[in-house]
Image: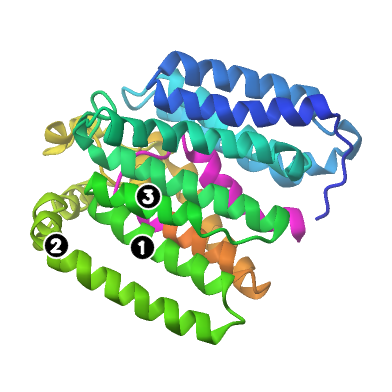
Amino acid sequence: MTISIDKTNFISHFVGFLFVMMAFSDVLHSKEVIFLSSVLIIGAFILCFPFKNAYLFSESMLLVLFLIITSLVNLFFTQNGLGGTMTLLGNLLLAYLYFLINNKKITFWVVLAYAVTIGYIAYKLFVLNSDPNDIYEGLSRNHAGFVVVFWTGFLLFHLKVTYNRFPLIFPIVGLILSFFLFGRTSLIVSSLMVLLVFFYKFRKNRIIQICAATALVAVCYSLYLNFSETLTTETNLGEGLDTPRWELWRIYLDHIDLINLFTGIDVTTLPMYNQFAGNPHNSFIKFHSRAGIGGIVFIILFFVSIYKYISSNQYYILLILLLLAIRASFDGDMFVGNFDFIFLIITFYWIKTD
């Protein structure tokens, strides 16, 4: 499917501004801002919906409609509110709008949104010397690590599909922040992201790869000598795979029956979940709890996207998507949240070029 729609500069920049709004909704940790963002996104969608190409509706909007319906059905079986459905709709439409506009026109806004979130975390860490768990009020350091990984991944994706560039500075900054945030999963994913970008940036120069790999091993060894005790203690790396997440996931899966397979499960009724504020620590499980069968359909389509990227040799995008999926699998900050549009865009970008 090829999308060819003329957009004015105003619409393009307005969509770009919406990315910044989503960034501020996270920094301010404000439900009001994310609700306002969703309303503005719906307005932008109405302004640039391609009426002349109505066939796009059947291809791209059926999933949006399906997820909204399943999310609304979920409200009758759980204590979830309508705000989650509005947030989900806003994220779905923002991803759709990204595919319609000229990506180069919103690069400034994508970089600004990245700078807002990364700058906020860096300011809290290095200027205010805040404890990583105090960066976001009421949220743990894992949320900050989630922010770093997702916005870094989105910027890397955007620069690849728009300019075919592989800047190392952004994943390196992400790795540094993840190091000081002491998040186990974020640290591992950020490290892999650096290696991914490095490989693609110098894939035609074997000498640089060997020299840099040697330097990387030396740096890692030096960090291990100086910070190994702090890392294993603060990040729980010393516990290996030992985490209450496994039990949370087991409990959720054990409580799925024929009815709530379609409606989603109210996590507030599950044992142990009250200890974690109803957070399953897995964005895909959380999605099912908020959208029922719609979440399962999305996961199926996610694997379809993996196949599409493999068949079209778009391995860089695929690997970024898989790294974000790994991060999302260990925390519930996505679906429904401030970062859904990032994952949706990277998951379904192949549609734009198919």
Chain-order first, disc 3 or disc 1: 1
The answer to whether 268 appears left or right of 209 in the picture is left
Chain-order first, disc 2 or disc 1: 1
The circle on residue 17 is: none
What span is in magenta? Answer: 325-354
Indicate yes or no whether the magenta region holds residue 346.
yes
According to the picture, the residue beneath numbered tag 2 turns out to be 226
Q: Residue type at mark 2?
A: Asn
State how far apart marks 3 and 2 are (Cα): 30 Å
Q: Quadrant of the N terminus?
A: bottom right
In this rendering, which labeled residue sits more in front, label 3 or label 2? 2
The answer to whether 293 appears left or right of 182 in the picture is right
In this rendering, which labeled residue sits more in front, label 3 or label 1? 1
Residue at horizontal 75 percent and vertical 44 percent from the top? 104
**Nearer to us in this view, 218 or 229:** 218
According to the picture, the residue beneath numbered tag 3 turns out to be 328
Chain-order first, disc 3 or disc 2: 2
According to the picture, the residue beneath numbered tag 1 turns out to be 191
